[in-house]
Image (tube, rainbow, N blue to C red):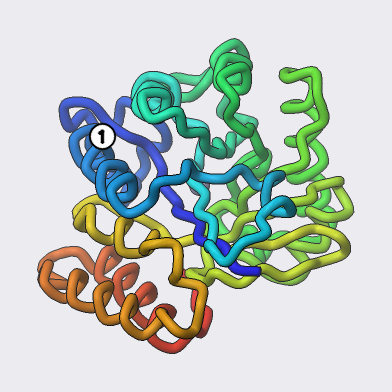
Amino acid sequence: MRVICLLYHDVIEESDWNSSGFTGPGTAKYKLSRREFEAHVESIAKMRHEPPKLARELTTVIDDTVPFLLTFDDGGESAIRAVAGILKELGWSGHFFVTVDQIGKKGFLNPEQIRSLRREGHVIGSHSFSHPMRMSRCSEGELVNQWTSSVKILSEILNEQVDTASVPGGYYSNRVGETAARAGIRVLFNSEPTTAIHNVLGCRVLGRYNISRGMPPGVSGDLEGNGSIGTSRNLPRHSQGGLTSLLDTGCCENDEVICESRLAVLISILTGSSCRL
Ligand SMILES: [Zn+2]
């Protein structure tokens, strides 16, 4: 089985890039303006008639369609101020991954907002406790602590067991996956631009395609395809469309990270390989 997961961060009003989520150097390039995000969603909706799936629904997919999932990292307040409303208009649901030690701080979701998102049908998951700079370099004990403490606090806020998570910064390793599984996480998203799924100690590990500011809406739409990206018969045609769209935008103007993202997506689509964003 294959699945297409898109990774977004904050969605910002009026170019106030520090209004939601992390505000350190380089963080703004991962945030989209409201107008950009609406254009991305519109592009996806044109290509896909079915809504995005939730991770727990993946076992019920029985046809050839490669399902797609929407994910949002960091736990910024824009999840409720912008994203939830846009998704609601389409009747869509997504996965929101919360950095637990930021809950209630300026620009981040508070417990009531987290509960509100959950009530609207979205999945709430852990984005670790403290968003380490390089998760894969943490000691085993630190990793266990990051996963168990964040899952425990979110489960208490929601009064239900949280078993979904995403890896901060995309710094995935086997040990990151194994400690997540041992903490009770059953679905873990990383940032490998791949549609493949693998299992680690009973935890499903899913890759994601990172959507950064400045990427054209067609990137999201192209990646969604027409429901047949996962079949070898249609993959070459689809890949060519993605390639054309990406190259037409002019890669590498001033933004190295966006260039890397596009390049990673291209490499992944063309070769079926996996490389970290
Ligand atoms: Zn993050």
Image coordinates of residue 242 in percent, x first then y, are 27, 73
Q: Is residue 196 left or right of residue 108?
A: right
**Residue under the point 46% across and 33% down:** 92
Quadrant where the image shows the N terminus: bottom right
Q: Is residue 156 left or right of residue 114?
A: right
Quadrant where the image shows the C terminus: bottom left
Q: Which residue is mark 1?
A: 17
Foreground pick, 55 / 109: 55
Image coordinates of residue 58 in percent, x first then y, are 68, 52
Q: Is residue 222 visible?
A: yes
Q: Is residue 26 left or right of residue 161?
A: left
Rendered position, 86 above or below 24 = above
Rendered position, 87 above or below 24 = above
Residue found at the very far top of the displayed protein? 112
Image coordinates of residue 171 in percent, x first then y, are 58, 64
Q: Is mark 1 within 8 Å of ligand 1?
A: no
**Residue under the point 60% across and 50% down:** 132
**Residue under the point 18% across and 76% down:** 244
Q: Give the class, few, some or many, for how many residues have Cα within 10 Å of label 1's Cα (few <14, many ≥20).
A: many
